[in-house]
Image: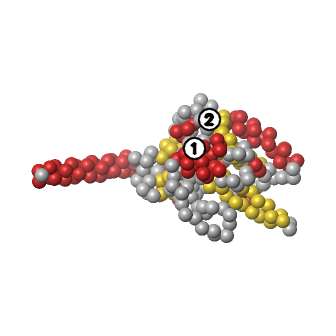
Amino acid sequence: MAKKVKLVDVSKCCACKGCQTACKNWNQLPAVETEFVGSYENPADFSVDTWCRVKFNEHEVGDSINWFFSKYQCMHCTDAACIAVCPVNSLVKTEMETVKNIYDECIACGACVGACPFDVPRVGDVMMKCTQCYDRIGNGLIPACAKTCPTGAVSFGDLDDKIAEAEARLPVLQDKGFANAQIYGKDELGGLGVIYVLPDDPEKCGLPAEPEISATTYFWNIALKPVKTLAAVGISIGFMNNFIKKKASEKQKEEVQ
């Protein structure tokens, strides 16, 4: 199966936030109360209930202001730092090359939060983030955000097709005066599951210029290998102990009755 990716064309985004709404709707995520913090960008950060955001990026160009709106979510990296650092292997690469968290195995330690070069994961009872609509694409559908986008800024398809589409878009933008128009995500971290068409430099579009996995993450991946199995065994023992206690408690209640 050809690798599929999401393509986000920042030059086409009108900041309608339809993708944010579609994400919450499909994944049954509750609305969160927000407040004005000096920008029309809202909410101001990810949370366990917010997996997709539209960033409002503004910068001065002479006497005017340029606005670039960029959809932001888990990038589903080929070389994923979160997978490398997870002590219990709850984060895995699926057959569709998306990064998935197995909730039943996640211990909410937060190691992935510090390791992610895009600052995406958020932790509650478990770590939550964009799934690339794994349940949809596994059934031949496209992600909810791509389905709802009214301007075509977000689309989904085979990697080679989306790269070709992005490359064809660059001369169009350059002819419109965006001399620094570029593709982002094609090579970063082994290739991202989200490819961007940027009208200007990454930093001006709310993205890190050179995302990288820290040396600390690599160190912990090596250091944790000998103890990952022990950690998994310890967690299993803990679950079993709780199960036995629960059954004993239920039996005592039956005897009392």
Identify the residue at image location x=70%, y=55%.
Answer: 15
User: Residue 3 shows which numbered tag?
Assistant: 2
Q: Out of 6 and 39, give the one closest to the viewer.
A: 39
Residue type at mark 2: give it: Lys
User: Residue 132 shows which numbered tag?
Assistant: 1
Residue type at mark 1: give it: Gln
Residue 187 seen in this snapshot: no
In what element is the residue under mark 1?
Answer: loop
Counting from the top left corner in percent of width and height, residue 17 is at 66, 53
- Confirm or deny contact between disc 1 and disc 2 (CB under 8 A): no
Counting from the top left corner in percent of width and height, residue 195 is at 68, 45
In what element is the residue under mark 2?
Answer: loop
Q: Is residue 26 left or right of residue 11?
A: left
Counting from the top left corner in percent of width and height, residue 196 is at 70, 47
Q: Is residue 162 left or right of residue 256?
A: right
Above/below status of 210 relative to 160: below
Badge nearest the viewer, 1 or 2: 1
Counting from the top left corner in percent of width and height, residue 12 is at 76, 49
Q: Out of 204 and 41, give the one closest to the viewer.
A: 41
Residue 159 seen in this snapshot: yes
Number of on-image labels = 2
Residue 43, by quadrant, is bottom right
Mark 1 surroundings: few (<14), some (14-19) or many (≥20) residues within 10 A: many
Residue 31, by quadrant, is bottom right
For the N terminus, the image quarter is top right
